[in-house]
Image: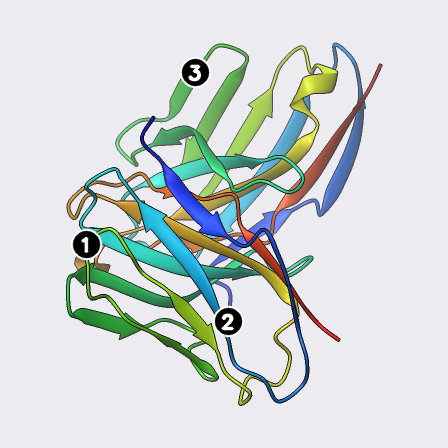
Amino acid sequence: DGGITQSPKYLFRKEGQNVTLSCEQNLNHDAMYWYRQDPGQGLRLIYYSQIVNDFQKGDIAEGYSVSREKKESFPLTVTSAQKNPTAFYLCASKNRDARDYTFGSGTRLTVV
Amino acid sequence: QQQVKQSPQSLIVQKGGISIINCAYENTAFDYFPWYQQFPGKGPALLIAIRPDVSEKKEGRFTISFNKSAKQFSLHIMDSQPGDSATYFCAASLRSNDYKLSFGAGTTVTVRA
């Protein structure tokens, strides 16, 4: 079955640590996205990538970093510079000129 | 600054009733308006979408109504069922912005049996 796999499902981070969230897709989609979801705020775009080895900042990129070394993979690193990282993180993908996104099941990150 | 405003934040409806969620947008260049449905602990999934040259689109019990002059669109869930209990997000995108989606804040719908 084609889809997007996010791992881990739950992640706990100590203050001052960097953590990396995994996102893998086997849909052969060109574009991949990272969103952050907080209660009452909808989904906010962190970073996106339209092709391998290229990515752009979204609306709330500060404190995050990404890489796109392979078409199927788009990992997100939450750095210690992100002051309020506790949230639900969603990865999505689509074909470049398509309109509709496919989302993964998310990773819930909690700072302890 | 949210480009798509969604209301209400939550609603409760009896089984068999109609759920109505409203969204308003500012950017008249938006040319695609999807709705996503999200169950707890899962990612959103596309439910239904409309383009601005159409005033209404229906898929099963779900209908989008679109009012271009008012810059508003809404989702109607007819004959609401307990399985429809979820969070619904409206969104908008435009081709010139790499088709990036701008999401509303979401509406949590609870259908009481």
Do circles 1 and 2 both sit on a common chain? no
Upstream in sequence: badge 3 or badge 2: 2
Marks 3 and 2, Cα distance to the nearest angstrom? 31 Å
Which picture quadrant has residue B22? top right
Q: Does B59 appear above or below A68?
A: above
Say few, some or many: other residues with alpha carbon within 10 Å of mark 2 (under 14 / 14 to 19 / 20 or more).
Answer: few
SS type, badge 3: strand
Query: Residue at the spot x=71%, y=47% of the render?
Result: B9
Residue B63 place in picture, x, y as percent: 49, 20
Of tags 1 and 2, which is closer to the observer? Answer: 1
Q: Would residue B88 be found to the left or right of residue B98 on screen?
A: right
Q: Is residue B68 visible?
A: no
Marks 1 and 3, Cα distance to the nearest angstrom? 35 Å
Q: Which residue is mark 2?
A: B1
Residue B86 place in picture, x, y as percent: 66, 33
Of tags 1 and 3, which is closer to the observer? Answer: 1
Query: Residue at the spot x=15%, y=69% of the render?
Result: A53
Q: Which residue is mark 1?
A: A71
Q: Which residue is mark 3?
A: B58
Amino acid on which the number 1 mark rests in the picture = Lys
